[in-house]
Image (cartoon, grey):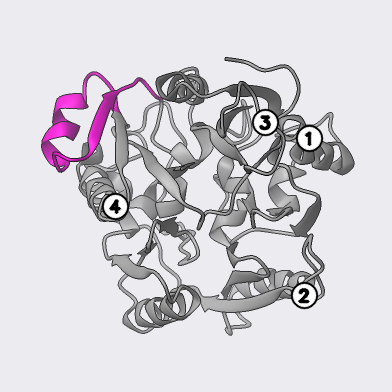
Amino acid sequence: MEPNGSPASYGYRMPGEWERHSRCWMGWPERPDNWRDDAQHAQRVFARVASEISKFEPVTVCASSQEWENARSKLPKHIRVLEMSMDDAWFRDIAPTFVVRDKSSSPGYDGQRVAGIDWNFNCWGGLGDCCYRDWSKDILVARKILEIEAVPRFPEDMVLEGGSIHVDGEGTCLTTEECLLNPNRNPNLTREEIENRLMSYLGVRKFIWLPRGLYGDDDTNGHIDNICCFARPGVVILSWTDDKSDPQYERSAEAFSVLSNATDACGRRIEVIKLHIPGPLYMTEEEAAGVKVMNAKYRFAETRLAASYVNFYIANGGVIAPSFGDEKRDREAYNVLCSAFPDHEVVMIEEAREICLGGGNIHCITQQQPA
């Protein structure tokens, strides 16, 4: 089902992540050239993330034909496991962005409340900048999911990853110039043209552009979901450090300056909750040696990991967040998230470093489908 026109023209909008979900979508990691030791550690952590989310909402995990049986054996029986080919498991970026229409708005397409956007995907930068050489399977994942769910599909040729945008569900979009204005994404589009596309597809009307993403987040060119996100309309959580010698300090400070002077689509001043990043983490010799050199971006020992507590997933009544073995900052992150989400149960995933080694974290490997 492919409607004519844009989602917004049918009354659709992208909801805030805290709005009710019908399920969460995830992939199953297996690339030995991105996930160390044949992905056995990553699979254990993905299974833990899926299990924790499934306590709050249904979860579907997609696995290749070669890995379906392995995934099925490692996941709880109540989690649905579907066979689907993919190049890697970053479902925030390759699964569809779901949109909804409210009952008071126009009737939507064919009367359906939920639809999905199938963005163009170029593996975070296209040839020369991409994370792996062939993404022909990834580019079909969104279309397959929308067919499985039998919801309208809005294809869009603009290159965009789900991790590069955050919305408040009330018309405001948060993003970074470092990613969306990078010439390796949409070199023929101006900032205004990109905004117009997003207004037409997400139903937003106000943009808050942060200059840069998290230090070290080179794989994605500074996705917003590693540095800042909405906790609720009018309130954002920002990755922060007080250490002025840390390269992240300048990035966080410039983001804070933008946010503290910004208003949202409803005219509210933005409230900023600072969430400290863990102390600097680096890939070890052992971890780097476990990644096979094949058809993906090389992983080098002593590379600083783009570790951030902001890269969490909001489920129906739960917040699933990473922790990194930094006792002080892990505890602080838990307390900040409990305060920011008083009606949610916060669950910290202690093994989240394994996801970070592959280039992202919990928000990056999940995609919510609205109820």
Tell me the kind of residue under disc 3: Pro
Q: Position of residue 268 (x, y in %)?
A: 77, 72
Residue in front for this viewpoint, 118 or 239: 118
Q: Nearer the viewer, mark 2 or mark 3?
A: 3
Q: Earlier in the sequence, mark 2 or mark 4?
A: 4
* Magenta-colored stretch includes residue 274: no
> To which residue does mark 2 refer?
269
> To which residue does mark 3 refer?
107
Residue farthest along the left direction in this orientation:
73
Left or right: 331 in relation to 239? left
Q: Position of residue 259 (x, y in %)?
A: 74, 71
Q: Which residues are magenta?
A: 63-86
Tell me the kind of residue under disc 2: Arg
Left or right: 127 in relation to 281? right
Q: Nearer the viewer, mark 3 or mark 4?
A: 3
Mark carried by residue 49: 4
